[in-house]
Amino acid sequence: MEDVIAHYYFRPDERTTPEEAAQAIAEEETTGTWTALTTRQDYVRRLDGIVESVEKSGRGYLTLIRYPAEIFEPGNIPQYLSVVAGNLFGLGRLEAVRLTDVEFPESLARFNGPNFGTEGVRHLLGTRNRPHVGTIIKPKVGLTPADTAHVAYEAASGGVDFIKDDETLTNQSFCPMNERVEAVMARLDEAKDETGRQVLYAVNVSDRADRIVERAEEALERGANTLMVDVLTCGYAALQALAEEPGISVPIHVHRTMHAAMTRNPEHGIAMRPIARLVRMAGGDQLHTGTVSGKMGHNAEELLLDNRALTDPWYGFRPVFPVASGGLHPGKVHAELATLGTEIVLQAGGGIHGHPDGTAAGARAMRQAVDAFLEGISASEYAKDHVELYRALELWGTS
């Protein structure tokens, strides 16, 4: 494949045929406009988008549109999106349109990709053949650096592999980033001395484009062992800048906050799959993709394919560690692993910190639920000999 193939679902308005609607997308995103052009030279036609197919699908249609590779500036993800996901969403001849997937030729996928990926993260923690258990510091905002560090210590002592800032916590006055990182890493060192286990802490370095690398470097100077970025609010280029900066040698955890504004409507916007592909190209090591049983909207079939976009062989990029997060607790572990497999990070915030016996007990309950699944035992049966899991299931149930 030498060109870009974009996949769209669309519904034309009543005055437009499906073929005309697909052609309108191809023209809007390449060389056309709403009227005849006196400035259009014949040689420009080589850059026209080409409608490859139009097929009926539910209430609408699926179309594949081929965009000549020459339209794209190699390595410039913002520009890639301006073509495959540009002005088409506002076209009056379309009642709805959704970018569902995009295929890039190797010539346009020459990025470094993840520096660690799933195997690199596993190597740092010494894990094999089991999902990672992660948590988010809760409450989302408001804790002091010292209290944030205490919550992290409790979670680490209880057995989590991964701890992250909330997407809304960056460098506010109530919890300055530098002070927070130093406090958290000191307490994680305590937990490591006590348990012998390394735990990753992803500090949120999301910031404006001209400061994000500097902020990341400040975090690393204070001992950070993982970085986090809100990719849709900061931009893919910000993620790429972090991943390609020579001095940044820790994993990058990618949060997808704001994604549902684009992904939730099944007929309009941008699906998660293109986002996943771009994150993998740009260098994310872990990415939130959703759950099959949590509090957010979900479609198990789509989610499995989204995760495959992160993990299947693709131009030599390392696999990205998918993250299931949002409303998880020990009673939901079986449903997640039975559907999504064990190459995943199970991330619980309230489902750990809301445990009636505290954060450490909540972390142990999550690990016990994972152990139960791996041993082929139901969580309810396993809980008979594991008090932390029993207390969690008593509170939240198994669904």
Image (cartoon, helix red, strand yellow):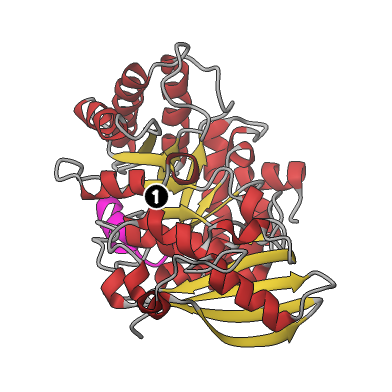
**Which of the 4 image quarters holds residue 352?**
top right
Tell me the quadrant of the picture where the N terminus can be found: bottom left
Residue 252 belongs to the span the image colors magenta:
no
**Which of the 4 image quarters holds residue 87?**
bottom right
Q: Which residues are magenta?
A: 117-131
Q: Residue at (42%, 37%) from the top-left corner? A: 156
Q: Residue at (69%, 79%) from the top-left corner? A: 20
Residue 311 image point, x, y percent: 41, 70
Residue 124 belongs to the span the image colors magenta:
yes
Residue 6 image point, x, y percent: 51, 74
**Hey, which residue is sitting farthest left in the picture?**
246
- Callout 1, which amino acid? Tyr
Residue 44 image point, x, y percent: 39, 74
Q: Mark 1: which secondary structure?
A: helix
Q: Residue at (72%, 58%) from the top-left corner? A: 265
Is 91 or 262 nearer to us in this picture?
A: 91
Q: Is residue 331 above or below residue 280?
A: above
Whether residue 340 sits left or right of residue 172 in the image: it is right
Is 158 or 320 nearer to us in this picture?
A: 320
Q: Is residue 222 above or below residue 204?
A: above
Tell me the quadrant of the picture where the C terminus can be found: bottom right
Whether residue 145 sits left or right of residue 106 in the image: it is right
Is 49 or 269 nearer to us in this picture?
A: 49
Whether residue 303 sits left or right of residue 152 in the image: it is right
Is 32 or 364 nearer to us in this picture?
A: 32
Q: Main secondary structure of the magenta part?
A: helix
Which residue lies under the disc numbered 1? 236
